[in-house]
Image (cartoon, rainbow, N blue to C red):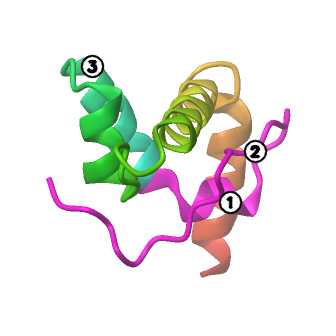
């Protein structure tokens, strides 16, 4: 995996019961996080390879970003799935 230099991530993913534009923009990142976690990739390697955050320079920030985005990804494919299907469907139709 390579670091994503073109992504703009917040330090902490949104905490909302709604799907927001940030979720749409980062859906690929969420998918990569879920795949990496399922494959047993450690958060340090994932933070560097997927999120582009150096866990040596900022271990607390890297871990917080990893944890919050992974939690958001899990919400999207879990409880948030019905809302995500509607939101992403709307986005696809209006593009």
Name the residue nearer the viewer: 62 or 72: 62
- Badge 1 marks a residue whose secondary structure is helix
The tag earlier along the polypeptide, 3 or 1, is 1
Which numbered dot is residue 14? 2
Residue 79 lies in the magenta-colored region:
no
Residue 2 on the magenta segment: yes
Q: Residue at x 57, y 65 (%)?
A: 25
What whole-number distance in Å separates the C-alpha atoms at marks 3 and 1? 23 Å
- Tell me whether circle 2 and circle 1 mark residues in contact (CB < 8 Å): yes
- Where's the C terminus, which quadrant? bottom right
Location of residue 50 in the rendering, given as x and y in whole percent from the top left corner = 32, 51
Mark 2 and mark 3 residues within 8 Å of each other at the beta carbon: no
Q: Secondary structure at mark 2?
A: loop
Q: Is residue 23 above or below residue 9?
A: above
Q: Earlier in the sequence, mark 2 or mark 1?
A: 2
Task: Determine the residue positioned at 30% across, 39% down.
Answer: 46
**Residue furthest left as drawn:** 1
Q: Position of residue 87 (x, y in %)?
A: 71, 53
Q: Which residues are magenta?
A: 1-28
Marks 3 and 1: CB-CB under 8 Å? no
Helix, strand or loop at disc 3? helix
Cα–Cα span, label 2 and label 1: 8 Å
The residue under label 3 is 38
Most foreground residue, 79 or 41: 41
Q: Is residue 25 above or below residue 44?
A: below
Prevailing secondary structure of the magenta residues: loop
Residue at the spot x=57%, y=43% of the render? 61
Residue 5 image position (x, y, % from top left):
35, 75
Against 76, residue 1 (above or below) is: below
Question: Which residue does the numbered mark 1 point to in the structure image?
Answer: 22
Q: Residues within 10 Å of mark 1 (few under 14, many from 20)?
A: few
Of 79 and 60, nearer the camera is: 60
């Amino acid at each position: 995996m390579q670091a994503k230099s073109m992504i703009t991530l917040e330090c902490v993913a949104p905490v909302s019961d709604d799907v927001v534009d940030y979720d749409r923009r980062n859906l690929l990142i969420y998918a990569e996080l879920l795949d990496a976690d399922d494959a047993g990739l450690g958060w340090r390697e994932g933070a560097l390879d997927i999120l582009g955050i150096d866990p040596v320079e900022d271990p607390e920030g890297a871990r917080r970003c990893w944890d919050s985005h992974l939690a958001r990804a899990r919400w999207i494919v879990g409880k948030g799935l019905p809302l995500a299907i509607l939101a992403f469907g709307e986005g696809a139709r209006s593009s």
